[in-house]
Image: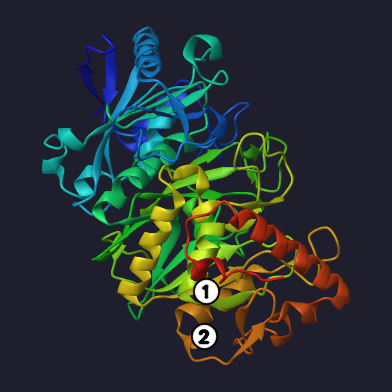
């Protein structure tokens, strides 16, 4: 039954804690989306089909001034500007016919979880948060109203556009974090991922104070109880590779790592749909059904069948679905210390090996570097192509603190757990992207991941790749050994050396910005 309450903020009837089916019905009645043939709610996010990093701000005040790494990603805004815009957003919502409120949680470990009051203009945005965040009764229903000190509030009003001159922002949209007030304000953008990544940034700011490493990674557990972590940017394999029928999923994107182990920040998954295949990704395919949300997926006008190959709206087509739609999964949404840590890198140059074992210092180097590719226009302004990037900590847009703090925590966690780190290339081999190379197949990468998580590579024989100074196995079960050493896959070794030196130079140049790391970490990277 739909619950109603009067809110002083709105002075209107608001719909509170609706079920998924109620929110779907409301979204359909309000023409916010349509049901696809697979019964998922399909919506459009308009001109912004990805995050808007240039429109993201953090309120600069006594709480954040000396803690945040202020840069072009972590942009400062004055408290006065935020307060005026927040009031304008409340006034805007006051004029609407209705609003939607849900009380949810982020963080599956009760010691670190936060209550989140989600207030949205749209029903489907509330459904998105209900899908992606954690339902209170799955943690402790009794704490939901007694957790006011830790409660955050999201206010999402996409219909309210901002004015750069008036509001002190950069465009007609703004995403603003206020850590003193525990508020996240989103204006002018319909892309739901801003709410999810906004709360991720909150935990990334808070958890290091508790000696917990926040991570942009997926995680799963084998039948032997061994846990694996998969770091990587969107489109490099985090969600796909962690959705493994032989292993139980913890989560596909955001986790914390503390003394007691791993815990998920979320209660749902957010998968890219571009070129989604039932054959290659059956678990994700089956999870997109009633109760799920598809963003910007083109439907056949007659049959309403999704066309996952159609990129006419964006390459960043998305599906949000409850974690419960994936089986097998870890019901507690957390696990013990990891045994294997995997850095997923999408190498456009085709010169990195499909897998390499990293030393402790190399782990810090490649974690800080975050080398990979931007795949599928996750951010506004990326365009439709694919390009190289160095995204610090494999998630630079979401980490408010200086990178060194997260790297130090990683090394501390590796020392504590004894986990082995591997670099896994899900990008190109035999040549560069667009110049004769081809991308590693999902089945081949899965075979490599199997060898990592099963412990086979702990006892494998290794050879040394000069320049990159990487140790690569000479044999992996189910994988053609000729692809393990990348130079052997190139028809022209001289061309390989040319591109390898180019990538090594890029690594070295990028790493110059980390001027406060030890020589042992700096020297663990490529050497020309």
Residue 285 position (above or below residue 359): above
Q: Are marks 1 and 2 in contact (CB under 8 Å)?
A: yes
Please give left or right for residue 107 compared with residue 344 in the image.
left
Q: Quadrant of residue 462?
A: bottom right
Q: Quadrant of residue 83?
A: top left
> Looking at the picture, how far across and down is residue 393, in whole percent?
49, 55
Is residue 326 something one can see in this rendering? no
Picture mark count: 2
Is residue 131 something one can see in this rendering? yes
Residue 524 or residue 20, whichever sits in front: 524
Residue 362 position (above or below residue 252): below
Tell me the element at label 2. Answer: helix
Residue 54 position (above or below residue 316): above
Residue 168 or residue 308, whichever sits in front: 168
Q: Residue at x 34, y 31 (%)?
A: 22
Residue 369 position (above or below residue 342): above
Disc sitting over residue 422 in the figure: 1
Query: Which residue matches tag 2?
Result: 457
């Amino acid at each position: 039954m739909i619950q109603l309450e009067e809110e002083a903020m709105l002075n209107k009837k608001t719909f509170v804690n609706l079920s998924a089916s109620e929110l779907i019905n409301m979204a359909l009645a309000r023409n916010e989306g349509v049901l696809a043939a697979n019964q998922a709610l399909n919506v459009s996010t308009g001109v912004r089909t990805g995050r808007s990093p240039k429109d993201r701000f953090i309120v600069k005040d006594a709480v954040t001034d000396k803690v945040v790494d202020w840069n072009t990603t972590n942009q400062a805004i004055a408290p006065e500007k935020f307060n005026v815009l927040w009031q304008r957003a409340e006034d805007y919502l006051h004029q609407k016919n209705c609003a939607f409120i849900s009380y949810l949680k982020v963080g599956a470990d009760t010691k670190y979880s936060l209550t989140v009051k989600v207030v949205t203009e749209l029903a489907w945005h509330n459904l998105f948060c209900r899908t992606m965040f954690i339902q209170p009764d799955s943690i402790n229903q009794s704490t939901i109203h007694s957790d006011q000190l830790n409660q955050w509030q999201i206010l999402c009003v996409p219909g309210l556009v901002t004015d750069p001159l008036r509001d002190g922002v950069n465009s007609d949209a703004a995403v603003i974090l206020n850590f003193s007030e525990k508020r996240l304000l989103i204006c002018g953008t319909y892309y739901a991922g801003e709410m999810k990544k906004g709360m991720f940034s909150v935990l990334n700011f808070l958890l290091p104070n508790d000696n917990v490493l926040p991570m942009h990674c997926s995680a799963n557990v084998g039948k032997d109880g061994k846990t694996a972590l998969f770091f990587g940017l969107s489109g490099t394999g985090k969600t796909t590779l962690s959705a493994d029928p032989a292993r139980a999923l913890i989560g596909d994107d955001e986790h914390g790592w503390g003394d007691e182990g791993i815990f998920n920040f979320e209660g749902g998954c957010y998968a890219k749909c571009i070129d989604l295949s039932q054959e290659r990704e059956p678990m994700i395919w089956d999870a997109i059904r009633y109760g799920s949300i598809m963003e910007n997926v083109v439907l056949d006008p007659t049959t309403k069948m999704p066309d996952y190959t159609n990129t006419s709206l964006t390459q960043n087509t998305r599906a949000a679905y409850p974690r419960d739609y994936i089986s097998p999964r870890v019901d507690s949404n957390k696990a013990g210390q990891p045994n294997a840590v995997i850095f997923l890198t999408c190498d456009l140059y085709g010169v990195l090996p499909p897998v390499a074992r990293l030393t402790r210092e190399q782990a810090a180097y490649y974690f800080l570097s975050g080398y990979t590719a931007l795949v599928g226009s996750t951010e506004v302004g990326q365009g439709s192509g694919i390009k190289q990037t160095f995204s610090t900590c494999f998630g630079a847009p979401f980490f408010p603190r200086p990178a060194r703090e997260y790297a130090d925590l990683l090394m501390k966690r590796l020392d504590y757990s004894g986990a082995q780190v591997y670099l896994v290339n899900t990008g190109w081999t035999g040549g560069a992207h667009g110049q004769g190379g081809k991308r590693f197949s999902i089945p081949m990468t899965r075979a490599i991941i199997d060898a990592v998580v099963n412990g086979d590579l702990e006892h494998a024989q290794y050879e040394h790749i000069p320049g990159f100074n990487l140790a690569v196995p000479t044999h992996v079960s189910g994988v053609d050994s000729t692809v393990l050493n990348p130079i052997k896959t190139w028809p022209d070794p001289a061309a390989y050396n040319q591109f390898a030196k180019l990538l090594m130079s890029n690594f070295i140049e990028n790493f110059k910005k980390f001027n406060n790391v030890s020589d042992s970490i700096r020297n663990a990277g490529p050497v020309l």
